[in-house]
Image (cartoon, rainbow, N blue to C red):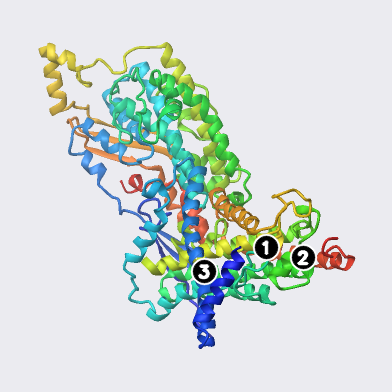
Amino acid sequence: MQEIRNYTINFGPQHPAAHGVLRLVLEMDGEVVQRADPHVGLLHRGTEKLAESKPFNQSIGYMDRLDYVSMMCNEHAYVRAIEQLLGVEAPARAQVIRTMFDEITRILNHLMWIGSNALDLGAMTLFLYAFREREELMDCYEAVSGARLHATYYRPGGVYRDLPERMPQYKESRWHKGGNLKRMNSWREGSMLDFLDAFADDFPARVDEYETLLTDNRIWKQRTVGIGVVSPEQALAWGMSGPMLRGSGIEWDLRRKQPYAAYNQFEFSIPIGRNGDCYDRYLVRMEEMRQSNRIVKQCVAWLRANPGDVMLRNFKVSPPSREEMKDDMEALIHHFKLFTEGYSVPAGEVYSAVEAPKGEFGCYLVSDGANKPFRVKLRAPGFAHLSAMDEIARGHMLPDVVALIGTFDVVFSEIDR
Amino acid sequence: MITEFVNQIHGAYFGFLGEWPTLAMLGWNLLKILVLTVPLILSVAMFTYWERKVIGWMQVRLGPVYIGKGLLQPFADVFKLLFKEIIIPAEANPWLFRLAPILALAPAFAAWAVIPFDWQTRIANLNAGLLYLLAMTSLGVYGIILAGWASNSKYAFLGAMRSAAQVVSYEISMGLCLVGVLIAAGSLNLTEIVAAQQGNLGMFEWFMWPLLPLFVIYFISGVAETNRAPFDVAEGESEIVAGFHVEYAGAAFSLFFLAEYANMILISFLAALLFMGGWLSPFQGLGIPLLSADGWWWLFAKAFFFAFLFLWFRATFPRYRYDQIMRLGWKVFIPLCIFWVFVTGVMAYAGTFVAGA
């Protein structure tokens, strides 16, 4: 009798659906996966170790680079940890701005997710539709912080600066001119809040557009319904969080369970799935986009009505303005101290988590009272999700593995850190 | 006019080479083949341009706009591919690796020999035209299997396996659809199949009405047969990277590309010929001036429509999973085909298909 052996296939690290640098060693029986062995670490940059060697504020930028599609949420966890150790709290307006940008980030992340997941399953048009909307929100990032991705906008004690009064406009080019240019700039006549208002009014129709392409599409359903089912018990046991957990029917959302920033001021609902398959997680994320949009709209209204400080005026933590610095010796000293030595954080340890778009993003911070963290440990949601890969993928086919990677919404920067 | 012109050239040519009749015949046939294949290759090039443009518009993009306002982009691509090195992997079987693209391309072009563009215009007027077409379209899969096998790569091998299974099973439903046409037209000759769709009721004389299920299945099978979205599992770039041609580069890759697009155009032409009356006007027999006149432009317009459908599908649908494609082919299409072939037989018995009835 002939001996029949399974064969292994190296899925990644250079693979169109590996979402970066996942190396998945698949043991296959024909097209059926017998064992999936994710290898991580190819994108390890030692963020946690790096953070130990520099003042607290200088690591905020590293947080952006962890999960590079939900930048500000990562900053939020880190900044909150520092604030908790320092015992300071950002002003109310800063809290609402953070809430708003967390939700913008959630929309950004989910747009990226729906685009790439659909592309993985072969529906490529959605990818470009999603990027059309992402572009608008990226412009908000840019308007507020100067960077489209790695914002470094949240600071201990508030946010870097208040929202801009003018939204940047498109300039005339070979492709954008005349009526076309006017239409593109029609939202950008006023302030950033006007722009976000216009965006939030329009966005549900865009989500409807995505749903027209996918939700009732037979092929989409065949590819996602019943694929990668995670039971609620398993989801808890594997330490899943975010849409992975809610897709399995467990109503757990840090925004509601342990409210932070200004989440308890605003109304939103938490969608949950029933079957815990890829399709339910897709529906959950689609609805989360709508809910995020709802929060953004409420935040815009609040921010319009309540001007105020966006940064704590505690110069031991947050720098004085440039103007003051040029004028006042005291301010100059504060500025110099903050940008060389930084501030010292009282000894202690704290865990602070936020509901990042992918799940619970936590920052465990230990301080020994110096101007640098003694230890930073970051809890990336994707790591827990990816570790369930073997169990979930077993018995599925190769194209389902692609669907699974998509539905885990993995980003290797945060998993490898 | 054109016929006269061609006749003149024909006369002059045979007058010149009259002493070597065999050689003259050979040369004349070569000329005919060139007259078909050169525009075909050009239309493949422009089809890729059109594809990128259409999908661009559908995806709120511009598509190619730079080289010659975008129109010369396909030629730029061709030259880029031609100048690239053909890399043969160390572990590959070099001869099969080289043979595979040729095997994929040759049948895709050979099939065009029996496609009539008009009452007279075609290379060969085979009586078994439909059978020849079936043979040629099935042969293309050997190129794909060989490419996957010779590459000695797991991804390519998976692609080849998928492609083989898929093409073989869709060949059956496609063949059954053709059986329906065969019953309706009573002939395997493509010109006669078109002739059988003549009548006085305009487009309602076409086979697409009595054979509607077969028509739909034929076109979907055609999409599957050419490995296009949503049935592009053989390439499936997000699953098995590029499937069977993952190891190919440069000119060898471009041959696969050419074959795929030539096949797409072929399927579009066939759908137009078999089910939509070919070059017959949609207003035939209604006596409307100009519009009722038959001519190649109708055939091209219809084929263009089907070719557009290929692109539209690609922009819209997610990709099927391999086993789901099989299920669709074997459990849905083939039974439906068999049933409708039976119905067609009953219709033929009842006299539905008498020309002009």
Q: Mark 2 — residue?
A: B196
10 Å neighbourhood of mark 3: few (<14), some, or many (≥20)? few
Q: Is residue B5 left or right of residue B88?
A: right
Is the C terminus of chain B in the top left, top right, bottom left or bottom right quadrant? Answer: bottom right
Q: CA distance from mark 3 to mark 2?
A: 28 Å
Sequence order check, earlier mark of 3 and 2? 3
Residue at 61 percent across and 60 percent down: it is B268
Q: Mark 3 = which residue?
A: B35
User: Residue B10 location, x and y as percent?
Assistant: 56, 75
- Where does the image place residue A208, in percent across and percent down from the top left? 57, 35
Question: With respect to residue A112, does B223 lie above or below?
Answer: below
Chain at tag 1 = B
Closer to the eye: label 3 or 2 = 3
Residue sitting at 47 percent across and 71 percent down? B157
Which residue is label 1 attached to?
A: B273
Bin the neighbour count of mark 2 within 10 Å (Cα to Cα): few under 14, some 14-19, many 20 and up. many
